[in-house]
Image: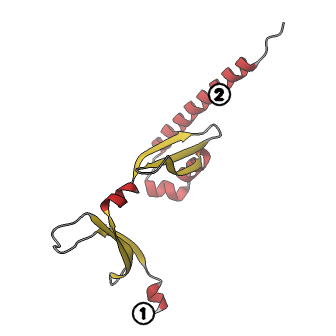
């Protein structure tokens, strides 16, 4: 096997078949293989119960006060949330309107109009909240 062959390795995950190919058991096989030949280079079998613990049981998404979109995954059998990720709202919009993405997703002008209306509505809500906060923190003159 040459280095160029080894460099073309892909990960895989599949239900494990033991004994009878028509019947799947409660394990999954994960590993690496060569794509063209399906030759398995390394693999490990993992019980389904362990795999299920790694699948998010709950996904929560919230907006932070500085414009970050925070996604958290709650995994079964772990204390608290794992896999927390924060992305700026501006970054999400920039990615959406990037020309290549627009063509790949077949975004229409009406889609963008709806997005713009929702963003403008959100901006009005933020301005109203700012106004409320400013007026409640102003000290009365006496």
Nearer-the-camera pick, 47 or 38: 47
Q: Indicate left or right for 122 with 45 as reference.
A: right
Q: Which residue is mark 2?
A: 127
Q: Which residue is mark 1?
A: 1
Q: Indicate left or right for 12 with 20 as reference.
A: right
Q: Distance from label 2 to label 1 (Cα)?
A: 64 Å
Q: Residue at x 53, y 40 (%)?
A: 62
Mark 2, Cα crowd under 10 Å, few <14 / some 14-19 / many 20+, is few
* Quarter where residue 49 is shown: bottom left
Vertical position of residue 44 compared to residue 88: above or below:
below
Nearer-the-camera pick, 110 or 5: 5
Q: Residue at x 56, y 55 (%)?
A: 98
The x, y position of residue 136, in whole percent, is 70, 18
Vertical position of residue 44 compared to residue 127: above or below:
below
The x, y position of residue 26, in whole percent, is 25, 63
* Quarter where residue 24 is shown: bottom left
Residue 84 visible in the picture: yes
Mark number, residue 27:
none
Vertical position of residue 71 compared to residue 122: above or below:
below
The x, y position of residue 103, in whole percent, is 47, 56
- For marks 2 and 1, the one nearer the N-term is 1
């Amino acid at each position: 096997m040459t280095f160029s062959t080894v460099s073309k390795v892909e990960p895989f995950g599949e239900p494990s078949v033991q004994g009878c190919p028509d019947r799947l058991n409660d394990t999954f096989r994960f590993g690496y293989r060569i794509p063209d030949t399906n030759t398995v280079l390394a693999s490990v079998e993992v019980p389904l119960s362990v795999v299920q613990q790694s699948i998010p049981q709950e996904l929560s998404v919230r907006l932070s006060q500085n414009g970050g979109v925070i996604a958290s995954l709650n995994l079964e059998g772990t204390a608290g949330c794992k896999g927390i990720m924060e992305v700026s709202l501006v970054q999400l919009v920039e990615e959406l309107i990037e020309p290549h993405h627009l063509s790949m997703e077949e975004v229409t002008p009406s889609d963008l109009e709806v997005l713009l209306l929702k963003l403008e509505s959100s901006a009005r809500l933020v301005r109203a909240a700012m106004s409320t906060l400013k007026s409640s923190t102003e000290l009365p003159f006496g």
